[in-house]
Image (tube, helix red, strand yellow):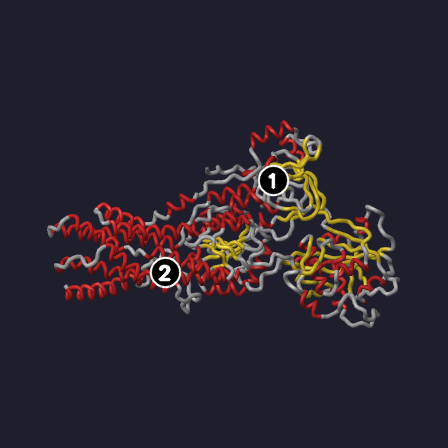
Amino acid sequence: MAVDKPELAPEWHTLGTEEVLRRLEVAPDQGLTDDQVESRLAQHGRNELEEGQTRGPLAILLDQFKETMVIVLIVAAVISGALGEVKDTVAILIIVILNAILGFTQEYRAEQAMAALKKLSNPVVKVRRGGSVQKVASDQLVPGDVILLEAGDSVPADARLIDAANLRLQEAALTGESTPVDKDVVGAFAPDAPIGDRHNMVFAGTAVTIGRGSAVVVETGMRTQLGHIAHMIQSAEDIKTPLQKRMQRLGLALAVVALVIVAVVFALGLLRGEEIGPLILTSVAMAVAVVPEGLPAVVTIALALGAQRMLARKALIRKLPAVETLGSVTTICSDKTGTLTENRMTVVLLDVAGQTQSLEEALRDDMPFLSAADVSPTNGGAPGQATNALLLAASALANDAVLQADDQTPGDFETIGDPTEGALVVAAARRGLWKNELDRIFPRIAEAPFTSERKLMSTIHRVPLNEPGTVVNPYLRRLMEAEGTPYIAITKGAPDQLLDISSRVWVDEAFAPLDDGWRQRIQEANARLAKDGLRVLGVAVRPLNDAPQPGKAEAVERDLAIVGLIGMIDPPRQEVKDAVATCRTAGIRPVMITGDHPLTATRIAADLGISENGRVLTGQELTAMTDSDLDRVVGEVNVFARVSPEHKLRIVNALQRQGQVSAMTGDGVNDAPALRQADIGVAMGITGTDVSKEAADMVLLDDNFATIVNAVAEGRVIYDNVRKFIRYTLTSNMGEIVALLVAPFLGMPIPLTALQILWVNLVTDGLPGLALGVEPAEPNTMKRRPYAVNESVFGRGMAQQILVIGLIMGAVSLAVGYWAW
């Protein structure tokens, strides 16, 4: 049963907390009563996603008999049976049944996107009801329930925050945002604010990475943002592939040809006074001669063999026609996070003491932080290098991420905790500044955790200046000895916030006043890095004579000395740039569609060669556009940022209205509707959610964008080979038709019966057809534009070749037959 479109209530993020609680009639310290829960459960239903109509095995099997060529064969079998020609009937039905079995086997895997969506639901959730905290099944939640969230929890429903402490959520699967999002109770947002910017809301299907909080449920089940996506998946139409459309047109054309020939033969026979029975058998033979019986089997086998070759190259085909569709793709719409990028925040730039260096440049100077060497000031190294070491060391100390070696990739690191903090400790480790050693030498004695109001985090550490045997980098030693203090405070956060609470800068291994010149220089550097699409963090220090009082760590956030700025980004995959260039050579336009910030998207697109004109369209601009407005610009814009699932779907639809064959790549829940609607959906196998994989036609097992290029080449080869087989088999069939049509006019008996034609076609079409189906690629396969999607399968002169060679074959056969007769 189809699911009605859910009505979303967009006003919750526009209201204050008190107004939300008033509308839901709930007290946050008490929660709902049992009577309220029972009443609302009856009104709103269970908190689960409803399934739309799906095809069962019988429906899939029946679909195999809807093709025009198959219908022609079934009609021929029925007529043969009615005339008592049992052998002809059995032979034709065997062909039909074999084709049906092949098609059914490939299509039996039913769509399971809804089942995968339901797996995202948290089975048990902590909820406050009747003044006490209980654990209940997530499907029993109702609007007004007060849920408790902490790190590691999955959010079971859409909810408005009523309490939050250092709360961050990973929303990449829903919005495409690569980094965790800070959440806050205060504030109201515009009605059209993108989901990723609604910081007072938490959404079903996302996860808490840091902090804790409580929220009041406002929407459940199909009325959540996740439910809205589920409805779009269900309502997306099944799109026929270019090959399916061509085969359908071919079948109709052959059916018309068969009917015309049968009518002509039948009419001429009646005029000559022949008996009805033999005429009908002759007509059946003509119809069978027209239909290339082996074509459905050869096409299916060619697609299956292509799918096997793709699997060897890390592309898993879920829906067989997608193999050929790739060869017709004109536009690839790609999600950014995890598809074009590594989905891992990485430090790329350090800005200190009036100079900006890439991290790689900073790492070229081999100055380890921990060394048994002499720690006197005579150790070499430039001042900028000293400050780089201090900047990285400080960012790793004021940090809660845990660093460990990556078991899968020797020499690489993996982190546990916030991705941004993880990027900092990895960068420090690459410089030789190992966090576990830093924490041991400079133990943390107090901290002021990050809050969204302050946009800062501070830690206070004891300085081991007088402990014998302690090994410390000489540059850091000089900083600590500058004022001889036993403690040091380290603060990291938004550069603008740091400037407001700083009075000094660390320059040339000494403190200097933060005058207007330095302030302007830091502001300009921050703006420049942000414009380049980088996420920018500032780091500052403050030597302390006394440790702060318990619970008063925030008091150290004044009179700081700014050390420098750190620029981070989710970097592009190394192999993607070459893949994008290959796409362009092959006449395929790559398009980035992401939920990330426009500046970040523009930077990545420029680095990869996706953006040619620098133009970017945001989700808010898309919302204000009509479909006709979007149709006018969709062919010119290569970067779409801050988009929602509805926007992705609109973009794919607009491309299809322009006659484009679109592929959509993605890995998140938010990508599933567009994956389903696109001509071919491509999901990521490693980072992809179950939802995206089940909604897609193809899954990249290595999450490598370059694999798509290999798959496109394979798709083009398959279509070329199918055309070779069609040309070969229809040329042969044309010869049969000529012989059958002309022989009676020469006074000859019918040259071939229906059974003989079936046998000849199977023998001559079968094995040669399979051989043609595995022909290697032509030299120009990826150096030409895709063939037009509306191109006839007989295009580019093939119809003339079939006609001429078929006439020659028919004439030669008739001449030999006439001589023998």
Q: Position of residue 103 (x, y in %)?
A: 39, 51
The x, y position of residue 712, in whole percent, is 46, 61
- Above or below, 227 against 581 in this view is above
Between 251 and 788, the one lying in front of the other is 251
Foreground disc of the pair 1, 2? 2
Secondary structure of the residue carrying tag 2 is helix
Q: Residue at x 44, y 46 (%)?
A: 237
Q: Which residue is mark 1?
A: 157
Q: Which mark is residue 483?
A: none
Q: Amino acid at mark 1?
A: Ala
- Residue 38, compared with residue 755, is above or below; it is above
| Count of marks, rendered view | 2
Image quadrant in which the C terminus is located: bottom left
Q: Measuring 13% from the left and 58% from the top, which residue is drawn there?
A: 745
Q: Position of residue 244 (x, y in %)?
A: 38, 53
**Relative image position of residue 752 (x, y in whole percent):** 21, 58
- Of marks 1 and 2, which one's residue comes earlier in the chain? 1
Q: Can residue 632 be spotted in the picture?
A: no
Q: Foreground: 92 or 153?
A: 92
Q: Amino acid at mark 2?
A: Val
* Left or right, 796 with reference to 178: left
Label 1: element kind = loop
Q: Is residue 97 left or right of residue 396?
A: left
For disc 2, the marked residue is 722
Q: CA distance from mark 1 to mark 2?
A: 49 Å
